[in-house]
Image (cartoon, rainbow, N blue to C red):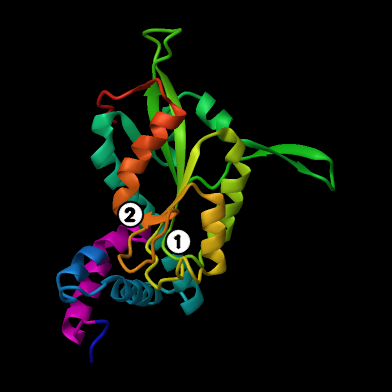
């Protein structure tokens, strides 16, 4: 019986390899993708097979169906974010741009986190607190102000939200894009749009209209996504990020900035 392009023997071999690896989360998604890409056939999207393999393996490890699917949603999202971040760094660190996760913030000056924090208030107890927005990828560069030569400053000039599916927290991403608009940084939304959930420019879905309204750009990895001025192919992300840096941090340093 075929399993998203996989025969039973290949399916069981991949499951056995993945189980022996002991990996979980995003690392497991990456492994399954590597094992599946070469056997599903040319031109076939491997992700449906990867999803089912992941869920099957989680069930074998003791999770019920709902917990296994929730685990997939979290792991695939984290894997997608990591893939995008690695691609950006591969292409842009030589030009002085880094794509960083929130977990990497402690490596940088404290003013970055302070700049990102948003003031909020709990009305019931009349208490204030600060909230860190849902920043999947932060775009950083070094600036060299003319008034302070020799004193490079790390500058945040863009934020990317990465979602594998528009059903998964896309509305939350719109909220944070709106909440951080007054910071002056550029915002982008990156999606696989595997099921063409964006609709078309002429007949847009509600989520497409919201993404177009609140993000500076939406990048889709699906060649079948209907494009417009706001919704662009993923391949344009590198040039757009360089343009964003010129707009937000005109005194940027374009020397290589390797980790």
Measured in 3D between alpha carbons, the distance from the residue under mark 2 to the one under mark 1, in whole angstroms, is: 22 Å
Residue at the spot 25% in from the left edge and 62% down from the top edge:
31
Question: Which segment did they paint magenta?
Answer: 5-32
The residue wearing badge 1 is 74
Quarter holding residue 182: top right
Where is residue 99? Give x, y as percent.
36, 39
Quarter holding residue 33: bottom left
Residue 169 appears in the picture as rendered: no
Residue 120 appears in the picture as rendered: yes
Of callouts 2 and 1, the N-terminal one: 1
Does dot 2 land on a helix, a strand or a loop?
helix
Q: Is residue 106 magenta?
A: no
Quarter holding residue 192: bottom left
Where is residue 235? Give x, y as percent.
29, 52
Q: Residues within 10 Å of mark 1 (few under 14, many from 20)?
A: some
State the mark number for residue 234: 2
Where is residue 89? Give x, y as percent.
29, 40
Where is residue 230? Give x, y as percent.
45, 53
Q: Residues within 10 Å of mark 2 (few under 14, many from 20)?
A: some
Relative to 250, 7 lies left or right: left
Reply above or below: 135 against 229: above
Reply above or below: 151 against 124: above
Magenta stretch, overall SS = helix
């Amino acid at each position: 019986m075929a399993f998203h392009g996989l025969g039973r023997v290949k399916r069981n071999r991949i499951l056995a390899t993945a189980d022996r690896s002991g990996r979980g989360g995003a690392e497991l998604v990456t492994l399954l993708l590597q094992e599946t890409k070469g056997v599903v056939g040319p031109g076939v999207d491997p992700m449906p097979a990867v999803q089912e393999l992941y869920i099957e393996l989680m069930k074998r490890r003791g999770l019920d169906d709902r917990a296994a699917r929730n685990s997939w949603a979290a792991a695939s999202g984290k894997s997608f974010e990591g893939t995008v971040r690695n691609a950006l760094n591969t292409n842009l660190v030589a030009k002085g741009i880094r794509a960083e996760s929130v977990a990497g913030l402690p490596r940088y000056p404290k003013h970055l986190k302070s700049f990102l924090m948003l003031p909020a208030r709990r009305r019931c107890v009349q208490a204030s607190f600060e909230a860190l927005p849902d920043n999947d990828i932060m775009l950083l560069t070094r600036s060299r102000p003319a008034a302070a030569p020799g004193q490079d400053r790390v500058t945040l000039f863009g934020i990317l939200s990465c979602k594998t599916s528009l059903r998964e927290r896309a509305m939350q991403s719109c909220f944070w894009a709106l909440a951080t608009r007054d910071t002056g940084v550029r915002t982008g939304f990156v999606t696989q749009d595997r099921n063409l959930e964006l609709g078309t420019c002429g007949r847009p879905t509600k989520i497409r209209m919201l993404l177009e309204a609140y993000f500076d750009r939406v990048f889709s990895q699906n060649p079948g996504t209907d494009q417009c001025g706001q919704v662009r192919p993923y391949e344009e992300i590198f040039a757009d990020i360089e343009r964003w840096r010129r707009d937000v941090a005109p005194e940027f340093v374009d020397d290589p900035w390797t980790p």
